[in-house]
Image: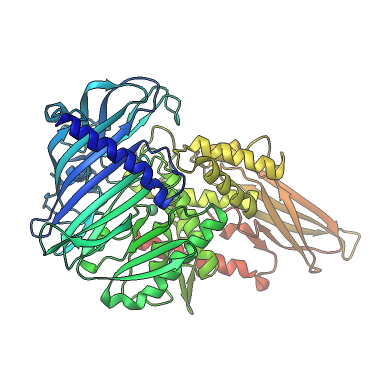
Amino acid sequence: MKRTLSGILFIFLIYTQICSQIINKEPLSPRITGYNIEATLDPSEKTVTGNMEAFWVNTSTGSVPDVQLHMYMNAFRSDKSTFSRESRHTHWMGNSYDGYIDITSCTDRQGNELLSRLQYISPDDGNPDDSTVLRIDLPEPAMPGDTVFLKIKFVTGLPSEIIRTGYSGDFFFVAQWFPKFGVYEPAGMRYRKESGWNCHQFHANSEFYSNHSVYDVRITVPFNYVVGSGGMLIEEPESGTDENTKTLYYRAEDIVDFAWTAWPGYKAFNDQWNHVSITLLIPEERTAQVERQFKAVKNALEFFTENVGPFPWPHLTFADPPLKGAGAGGMEYTTLFTSGSSDIIPEWFHLPESVTVHEFGHAYFMGIMATNEFEEPWMDEGMNSFFEARIMDKYWGENSGYINHPHLKLADKTISRLTYVRSGYRQVASNDLFSWNYPQRTYGMMSYNKAATWLYTLMGIVGEETTNDIFREYYRLWGFRHPSSGDFINVVNEVVARDHGNKFGNNMNWFFDQTLYGTGVCDYKVAEISNRKYEDSDSLYSSTVGLQRTGEVMLPLEISVRFSDGDEITEAWDGKGRYMELTYTGYRKVERVIIDPEYRIRMDVNFVNNSMTVKPDTVPLRSFTNKLLVLIQLFISIFTL
Ligand SMILES: [Zn+2]
């Protein structure tokens, strides 16, 4: 029995390596973990019964006494779980705590039953009522290079209130559903001084940090169900254990999580973009949205391929859940993601497109560059929000990426900026401020909006081409690894030095100290324009422009100065002083001054005071734009209380 089991597991490992050549010629990742799961959905009991073989390789230089696994469905087990406690402020949760995951059997490669060695731990908050992290005390420590095999039988009860995962009637979105290894970080990895497990509990904010893994998953569902997953369909459906069910075999390589969805009401559409076969699952009544959705995902594929790196997988599935499953919308599982559309959303409102572009983008920031969302959420959500805004700008109009109505145009990037600008809850991103420690009102602003806004500001300073160079290099160096903030900053410093020499100083740390690691406000204003006529001349003027830095943040700026003869010049300011004067003598007056006329410094919290004109009847167009922005700020503040 023991020998047979270990033989099966060994064959599974070999098979995993052979199969890696089916989809990708060379493995993209080190493949420290792998999973082979048989999953059976019981639609009446709302459960998934799983039979799993999994391995973890000790790649560290020391012995490891245990393994730690995520058991995230237990977040929905009671109102005392860490997720439930935190969710009172972020997600709507009723009183039906009916999600769970139970392990019914757990054996090692020798067939030893390990159930008595299982223990729930709460490394993040010590909550004794949380059971989302499982520690298995190994019978023998794993030595360097050892592979730990586990065979686990489990039952997952899906929650009736879908928050990312769960069911509604006959609709199922099955995510965070199986025991999944944490990441064992050797000393020196990211900012870790000692080796150890990085296995966070399930939180209301943030979910992802895992090794890139290979998944072989066989899903058994009733015959009439339409299934989508993050894997490539290797075997066409065949009958399950009885003639009313079917089993689909999926394989996914080098992704950080595996989720799936099943619902009889899905209609499947297929399209192709270069090497990528794309499947969209959407309710039949929303067929009119299909073209929009494919256009959005193809635009995102093109933009990321050109400006970051190639999409490495040959398959991509995205689902648009029905209204009753809307809680599963807007989620990312790398090669499976969910959008959110409706048959009543008009063409001019690009909300579904922005959701699709955003959730697709996570395939790069957390899927390929597998950052630790718990500890540095900006590296996933912030970078992704930045790219979402750039893509919406490029393909749907620079000022109309989000809304393109004859009477209202709104850029995606404007929403991010205004959310940041209007927030009174700025905080510093630091290595000990993890996602669950943020005060509720700061998490989203800091992780998404502020980061997107300072990334735009960085692009404003170093230029778009250098920004693309940075992300291409980031992808090249850190794809299928686990970069930290420091790794990204190193890439920025190298690429900026390569493209610009020391134009911005020895490195860009001054920028990150003020933006990522700073809480300061950025605000520059035109304080005054004065034109004094020389007493002994009819038309000779001494003109002074006063510029003021009212915030703490110091960034290099351009200033546009227009004279009464129509001449317009651009001045540079390092932005460091509290006050700066520009003086001119000539037979002309200074008529108008604009700080940062191209709106490159998008962290500036007040664009209205960036310009001044001496002729009220020739108010520059920008001033009107600024007033419109203020109105939009007001509008957004009303709806984001
Ligand atoms: Zn996101």
Q: Would residue 392 be seen by someone viewing this image from the given angle?
A: yes
Judged left or right of residue 491, residue 380 is left
Q: In the picture, residue 201 is in which quadrant?
A: top left
Q: Nearer the viewer, residue 557 or 127?
A: 127
- Reply above or below: 525 against 81: below
Of the 4 image quadrants, the one containing the N terminus is top left
Judged left or right of residue 313, residue 575 is right
Q: In the picture, residue 272 is in which quadrant?
A: bottom left
- Reply above or below: 281 against 335: below
- Reply above or below: 623 against 499: below
- Reply above or below: 517 against 215: above
Residue at 26 percent across and 44 percent down: it is 36
Q: Position of residue 576 (x, y in %)?
A: 65, 41
Q: Position of residue 471 (x, y in %)?
A: 55, 48
Residue at 33 percent across and 26 percent down: it is 146
Q: Residue furthest right?
A: 536
Q: Would residue 424 be seen by someone viewing this image from the given angle?
A: no
Residue at 65 percent across and 60 percent down: it is 597
Residue at 15 percent across and 64 percent down: it is 170
